[in-house]
């Protein structure tokens, strides 16, 4: 049984739930087994258990202040026009930065940055410079004023088009206005792989 994210990472886990401090992870089980543990208990009301999703490091900023937040709830809503979303708790430091700037960047997190993703999900940007603490490089974007993470292979530049309040989280719906991609992921025909 892993009681800390450090123990979980040491034991090979890359998926950590937002409420991992309270729920923990079973180190003797694989990811699939961990997600089915809920079947061992009887729940009286609905919950937010989903299959393991890779975390995304989302960079936010207004040209003066930058921050990183780890997001578990994100995805593509439409391909035409390219639309995405992230769900953020209003209590998070990044929430107001996104509300005020209307922009963010979804940086797809490679396995090599899982420790950074965990760190950015555990500490507030109000007290820590997460770029510096995680030795990440801020890279200017072409279509938004916030920055991308240079170490991430793909970054989606997003402009908020709507905000939907959904209880514990608000969903920021956003148009994808630019994509930064590592050249090694583009084949000779210009397709992303």
Image (cartoon, rainbow, N blue to C red):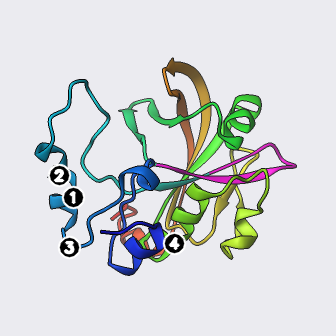
Q: Position of residue 76 (x, y in %)?
A: 38, 38
The residue sitting at the right extreme is 64
Which residue in the rendered view is the most extreme toward the left?
40
Q: Is residue 1 above or below residue 144?
A: below
Label 1: how many Cα within 10 Å (few below 14, some 14–19, many 20+)? some
Is the C-beta separation of discs 4 and 1 under 8 Å? Answer: no
From mark 4 to mark 2, how far is it between C-alphas? Answer: 24 Å
User: Residue 37: which disc?
Assistant: 2
The secondary structure type at the circle numbered 3 is loop
Question: Of helix, strand and loop, which mostly describes the magenta segment?
Answer: strand
| Dot label at residue 115 | 4
Residue 30, x across and y down, in percent: 19, 68
Is residue 139 placed above or below 95 in the rendered structure? below
Residue 145 in picture, x, y percent from top left = 76, 46
Q: Is residue 188 magenta?
A: no
Q: Secondary structure at mark 4?
A: helix
Mark number for residue 28? 3
- Label 2 sits on a secondary structure element that is helix
Alpha carbon distance from label 3 to label 4: 20 Å
Q: Residue at x 48, y 54 (%)?
A: 56
Q: Is residue 64 magenta?
A: yes
Task: Please report whichever mark, 4 or 1, sits nearer to the chain's N-terminal start.
Answer: 1
Front one among 156 and 50: 50
Q: CA distance from mark 2 to mark 1?
A: 5 Å
* Tag 3–tag 4 contact (CB < 8 Å): no
Q: Quadrant of the N terminus?
A: bottom left
């Amino acid at each position: 049984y892993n009681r800390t994210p450090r123990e979980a990472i040491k034991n090979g886990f890359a998926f950590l739930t937002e409420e991992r401090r309270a729920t923990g992870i079973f180190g003797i089980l694989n990811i699939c087994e961990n997600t089915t543990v809920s079947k061992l208990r009887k729940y009286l009301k609905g919950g937010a258990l989903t299959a393991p999703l890779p975390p995304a490091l989302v960079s936010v900023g207004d040209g003066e202040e930058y921050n990183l937040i780890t997001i578990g709830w994100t995805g593509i809503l439409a391909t035409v026009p390219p639309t995405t979303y992230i769900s953020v708790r209003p209590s998070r430091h990044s929430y107001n930065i996104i509300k005020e700037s209307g922009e963010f960047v979804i940086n797809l997190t490679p396995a090599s940055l899982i420790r950074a993703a965990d760190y950015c999900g555990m500490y507030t940007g109000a007290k820590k410079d997460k770029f510096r603490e995680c030795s990440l490089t801020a890279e200017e974007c072409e279509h938004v004023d916030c920055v991308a993470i240079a170490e991430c292979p793909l970054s989606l530049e997003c402009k908020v088009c709507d905000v939907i309040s959904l209880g514990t989280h608000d969903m920021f719906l956003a148009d994808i206005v630019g994509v930064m991609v590592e050249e090694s992921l583009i084949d000779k025909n210009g397709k992303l792989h």
